[in-house]
Amino acid sequence: MNTLHIRSEEELPEVAEALLAALGDRRVVVLRGEMGAGKTTLVRAVAEALGADDQVTSPTFALVNQYRSAAGDRIYHFDFYRIDTPAEAYDLGYEEYFYSGDLCLVEWPEKIEELLPDDVMTVRIEVDGETSRTFRID
């Protein structure tokens, strides 16, 4: 497990680089943290680290947003906060995304726990203060 402490959002690129370095063959990254912990902000930092020019926003209502890396690879960003049952993820066709080989960054994985692949990377975000966070990557 890799643990990083940051004092401000300006340090997020370091977290994004650590996440990408630890990814290996895994393609699904689950982001766990309370509301306002910075999950979407971390996704933005990861997309930027991969050279995406897209505007990264939370897909709260759309459930999934797609971005493109500088190399042309797809990055999928999920937010399952508003779903009530895993059946809604089936309706979305989650399997096509999770098993596509493309990078999938998942907010609120607790809502679809039983649908997650076995080899997910987990990033836990703990709020330490107004702008400080602890990230545990494993």
Image (cartoon, helix red, strand yellow):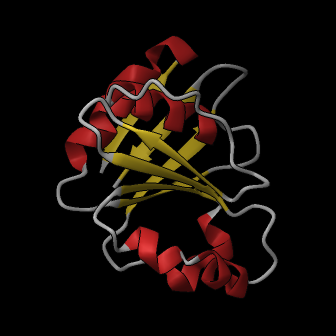
Is residue 78 or residue 62 the one in the foreground? 62
State which quadrant residue 37 falls in.
top right
Lateral position of residue 84 relative to residue 16, left or right: right
Q: Residue at x 46, y 79 (%)?
A: 95
Query: Residue pushed farthest front?
Result: 72
Question: x%, y% of residue 23?
Answer: 25, 51
Question: x%, y% of residue 54?
Answer: 51, 29
Lateral position of residue 16 relative to residue 41, left or right: left
Lateral position of residue 137 relative to residue 114, left or right: left
Q: Is residue 13 above or below residue 109?
A: above
Number of numbered tags placed on the structure image: 0
Is residue 88 or residue 13 the one in the foreground? 88
User: Quarter of the image containing the C terminus?
Assistant: bottom left
Question: x%, y% of residue 44?
Answer: 52, 31
Q: Is residue 38 above or below residue 107?
A: above
Q: Residue at x 56, y 43 (%)?
A: 125
Question: x%, y% of residue 72?
Answer: 29, 39
Q: Residue at x 56, y 17 (%)?
A: 9
Is residue 135 or residue 47 the one in the foreground? 47
Q: Residue at x 59, y 66 (%)?
A: 109
State which quadrant residue 100 falls in.
bottom left
